[in-house]
Image (cartoon, grey):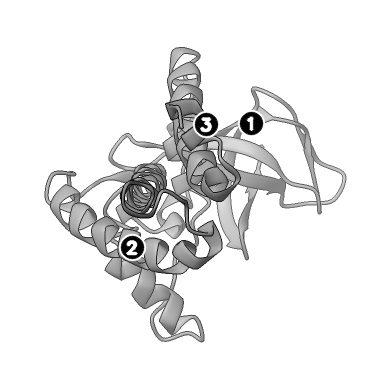
Amino acid sequence: MTLLEFLFHVNNSVFTSALVLMLGIAILEGIMSLIGLALSDMIDSFIPDLDLSEDVFALSKFFSWIKIKQVPIIILFVILLTVFSLLGLFSQYILFSIFNSLLSQWILFLPVFLTSLVFLRIIAVFLAKKFPKDNTSSISKNDLIGHIATITLGTAVKGSPAEAKAKDKYGQMHYLMIEPENEGCEFTYGQSVLILGKIKSHFYASNEIPNKLK
């Protein structure tokens, strides 16, 4: 069996797909960085600020376990995809070397995925020590209230938010969804607005910005 036949064998498709997705994300991050955007910052800004006292306690504990607030999520996702794909393909290679056949990928899927999470945790703990404590993912999105945001995509009206970007107190960029505070108002591309508050997963803002903030 050639390398290409091995990679694209039906019993390796999920592992090869993970590898291709990882490479695609890396390429997309590189392209976006060339045009002044950061895919990692954009995704981090949409991760909810979870409260351990809420009903999502288990999810919060899991996020904390993989250091999702200390390491950018795009990096964690790329690590998970890489480890998952390589572990799966390596396991299939060993099995093929011994039995001259490949095991069903769905039998391998769960043990490989769980093992990948363990490796992800180990790597994330190491990386968390390397990232500055004021990393964008470590602050609450509520800290953006009172800051200036710039509309980057679409037109925002009441009830229909648009994408915007804003810098936190550390100078790090966040991407968020913003809508006008009042009916009849709209925000267009390139417009600067003042973030006033948060509604669930998005913010509301005003186009009236005090002179001292301009």
The amino acid type of the residue labelled 1 equals Ile
Q: Is mark 1 on a helix, strand or loop?
A: strand
Crowding around mark 1 (Cα neighbors within 10 Å: few <14, some 14 to 19, many 20+) is many
Kindly check if marks 2 and 1 are in contact, taking CB atoms under 8 A apart as contact: no
The residue singled out by tag 1 in the image is: 151
- Mark sitting earlier along the chain (3/1): 3
Q: In which quarter of the image is residue 52?
A: bottom left
Please give the label number shown on residue 95: none
Please give the label number shown on residue 117: 2
Q: In which quarter of the image is residue 120?
A: bottom left
In the image, which is nearer the foreground, mark 3 or mark 2? 3
Of 30 and 164, nearer the camera is 30
Would residue 85 be found to the left or right of residue 115 on screen? right
| Residue 106 in picture, x, y percent from top left | 55, 63
Q: What element carries label 2?
A: helix
- Mark sitting earlier along the chain (3/2): 3
Q: Does the rendering let one see residue 174?
A: no
Kindly check if marks 3 and 2 are in contact, taking CB atoms under 8 A apart as contact: no
| Residue 100 in picture, x, y percent from top left | 41, 48
Q: In which quarter of the image is residue 169?
A: top left
Crowding around mark 3 (Cα neighbors within 10 Å: few <14, some 14 to 19, many 20+) is few
The amino acid type of the residue labelled 2 equals Leu
The residue singled out by tag 3 in the image is: 5
The amino acid type of the residue labelled 3 equals Glu
- Mark sitting earlier along the chain (2/1): 2
Above or below, 52 against 187 in this view is: below
Alpha carbon distance from label 2 to label 1: 37 Å
| Residue 83 in picture, x, y percent from top left | 33, 48
Kindly check if marks 3 and 1 are in contact, taking CB atoms under 8 A apart as contact: no
